[in-house]
Image (cartoon, rainbow, N blue to C red):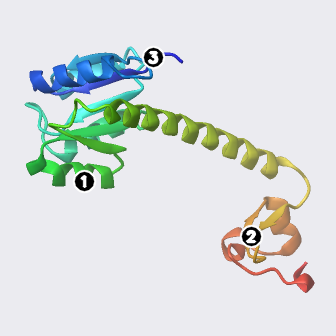
Amino acid sequence: MSANTVLIVTNDVADAKLLKETLAAARDGAFITEWVRHLSEVVNRLDRRGVDIILVDLCLSDSQGPGTFDVLFELVPAIPIMTLCDEENEYLAIEAVQRGAQGFLSKGHFPNSLVPQAIRNIIQRKKVEEALFVERERSRVTLESIGDGVLSTDVAGNVTYMNAEAERVTGWARDEAQGRRIARSSI
């Protein structure tokens, strides 16, 4: 297994040190960690690629709150982002999760063996999601390009998918057919 690269974004030296030590001692293999202190430094680092996950403090000297997550998410939507927070600002981390963050790590709990495991799980989950998206898109393109009508239903017989040829054959628009129950006499 190759080492995952973690970009830590915090201006708190103690937090960065704890995270680096925790990730270096991970039971299932060390992580490569990089640390920057400011959101403005992240852009330069991301130009070099190779980051598997970003751990970002929502209380930076040059950016505050969930807007910090928003900036990163807009820059690199494919890279999982976890926020770092203390108890009094946990509500900010929860808001970031609602906006798309993969989770948050509470300050004071960094030196825990579950932290590397959680980070590795999130990285792996993101890779699986990307692979599924690629496969799904490949299947969609294939089904759209064949000349036969293809219609899929769920176990109850409700339409879940139909390609352009199936639209032509049935006379139904996809949007109208979605969820419509197929009766044997319908086709």
Question: What's the distance in space between the residues labelled 3 and 2, CA to CA?
Answer: 41 Å
Question: What's the distance in space between the residues labelled 1 and 2, CA to CA?
Answer: 35 Å
Q: Are marks 3 and 1 in contact (CB under 8 Å)?
A: no
Q: Quadrant of residue 98?
A: bottom left
Front-most of 46 and 83?
83
| Dot placed on the residue nearer the N-terminal end, 3 or 1 | 3
Circle 1: is it few (<14), some (14-19), or many (20+) Cα within 10 Å? some
Q: Which residue bears the numbered disc 2? A: 154
Q: Secondary structure at mark 3?
A: loop
Q: Which residue bears the numbered disc 3? A: 3
| Dot placed on the residue nearer the N-terminal end, 1 or 2 | 1
Identity of the residue drawn at 20% across and 28% down: 39
Quarter containing the C terminus: bottom right
Left or right? Give the position of 179 relative to 110: right
Q: Is residue 71 above or below residue 173?
A: above
Give amino acid for label 1: Ile
Give amino acid for label 3: Ala
Could you say which disc has been placed on residue 94 in the image? 1
Number of the front mark, 3 or 1: 3
Number of the front mark, 3 or 2: 3
Q: Secondary structure at mark 1?
A: helix
Where in the figure is residue 185, as x and y percent of width and height? Answer: 92, 85
Where in the figure is residue 60, as x and y percent of width and height? Answer: 12, 33
Q: Is residue 68 above or below residue 170?
A: above
Q: Secondary structure at mark 2?
A: loop
Give amino acid for label 2: Asp
